Amino acid sequence: MLRSIILAAAAALVATSAQAQTIKIAILGPMSFVQGENHWAGAEMARDEINKAGGISVGGKRMQVELIRADTNEIQSVSDATNAIERVVTRDKADFLIGGFRSEAVLAMQEVAMDYKKIFLGAGAAHSKLGANVEAKYDRYKYWFRVTPVKDTDLVRTLFAVLNTIAQQIRTELKTDMPKVAILAEKAVWTEALIAAAQKNLPAMKMEVVGTWQPSATATDVTAELSAIDRSGAQLVFTILSGPVGISVGRQMGERGMKAVAWGINVEAQKEEFWQAAAGKAQFVSTLDTLAEVEITPKTIPFVKAFKARFKKAPTYNAGTYDAIMLLKAAIEQAGTTNADKLVPVLEKMSYVAAAAVLEFDKRHDPVWAPGKNTGIAVQWQDGKKVPFWPPNMKGMQPFKLPAR
């Protein structure tokens, strides 16, 4: 009996000791969708790279990274997302939280994370309110940092810069003074600011807005919207899409042989499987992206190549969980602790060269937007390949193409 008690106590001690040697990081994402797949893939790469090198040094003590996979199902359900984050904190005892995608869900997830005072590094949601919360109630929301993407209003800055370049090409090649633009945005909270900005600013950029169409984020048929856009005479379709509807848009634009070219955000078009998913019909579809084999930073090309070698496909921006974990590692080693309150001021002052950008944070804990640091890139599908074309001064860029007329 005594021997059994001793063995049980020893086993408990070993388990406790093993647990103490790990830093638990919960990866939160819609794991049945490409966004969640990339959340997990990027995190696995970071975990394996760190652990192979001996782990994270915490005040001189080496600790391994342990990942907790949490399916938020947030594309379908906000309550599933909040349940997932509650579970990883209370049951799985996660030390840090990384991920999130759909803004409506992440706003709710943010509340849970702040209740528990857990550092939550966002890797998917763009809505400005996430950062505005930090500025409005710092003591509560200071544990939130957005790693990727830049906030919605900064996305607009990049989108409009590229849009202006494409519009100028349309003016030159099609000999028109006022390119006609159709806005095609999914029905979601995150798109509202982008739609408003486009409706307000495009006329001042000498472009005519011919209308706004808003299908469901999961729509499998956008015939009605594309037919109306065809009738409008649009030469450019400004897309604001993050859900599976992006595949439908790409495929059906090709099936219709539309002369308008698509540019904007199409998260589905960021992934390597997009061409096949769109039945090879997505010629000339272009999208804002984060990662490609171009030299955004010295770490970009090695990361993308390693990701492709391991997963046999290119990463989407949600694989920014890799950068988030690497940023966290740097902050922990600088602070010498995993204590959230001590890590916050360290993260606030960091300038970290990541794979996708040079990460610095503003007072809202949003990534600082700046050319040469963090703007994102633009890519276009050409003959089955994703071709980067903006910013033009970056090594590896190729020409943007318009459909034949």
Image: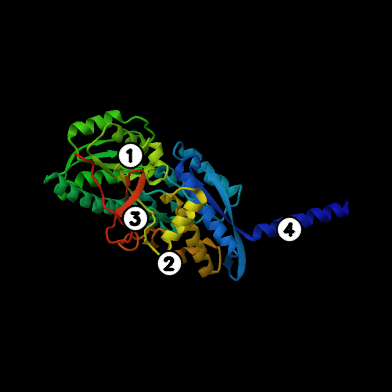
- Pointer 3 and pointer 1: residues touching (CB < 8 Å)? no
Q: Which of the two discs, 4 and 1, sits closer to the camera?
A: 1
Question: Disc 2 marks which amino acid?
Answer: Met
Res. 228 image quadrant: top left
Q: Earlier in the sequence, mark 4 or mark 1?
A: 4
The residue that disc 4 covers is: 14
User: Helix, strand, or loop for circle 1?
Assistant: loop
Q: CA distance from mark 3 to mark 1?
A: 21 Å
Question: Disc 3 marks which amino acid?
Answer: Gly
Q: Earlier in the sequence, mark 4 or mark 2?
A: 4
Residue sitting at x 50%, y 64%: 343
Left or right side of 395 for 84: right
- Pointer 4 and pointer 1: residues touching (CB < 8 Å)? no
Q: CA distance from mark 1 to mark 2?
A: 40 Å
Q: CA distance from mark 4 to mark 2?
A: 36 Å
Q: Earlier in the sequence, mark 1 or mark 2?
A: 1
User: Helix, strand, or loop for circle 3?
Assistant: loop
The x and y percentages for residue 355 are 43, 60
Q: Which mark is on residue 223?
A: none
Q: Residues within 10 Å of mark 1 (few under 14, many from 20)?
A: many
Question: Disc 4 marks which amino acid?
Answer: Val
Q: Earlier in the sequence, mark 2 or mark 3?
A: 2
Q: Which mark is on residue 282?
A: 1
Question: Disc 1 marks which amino acid?
Answer: Ala
Q: Which mark is on residue 376?
A: 3
The residue that disc 2 covers is: 350
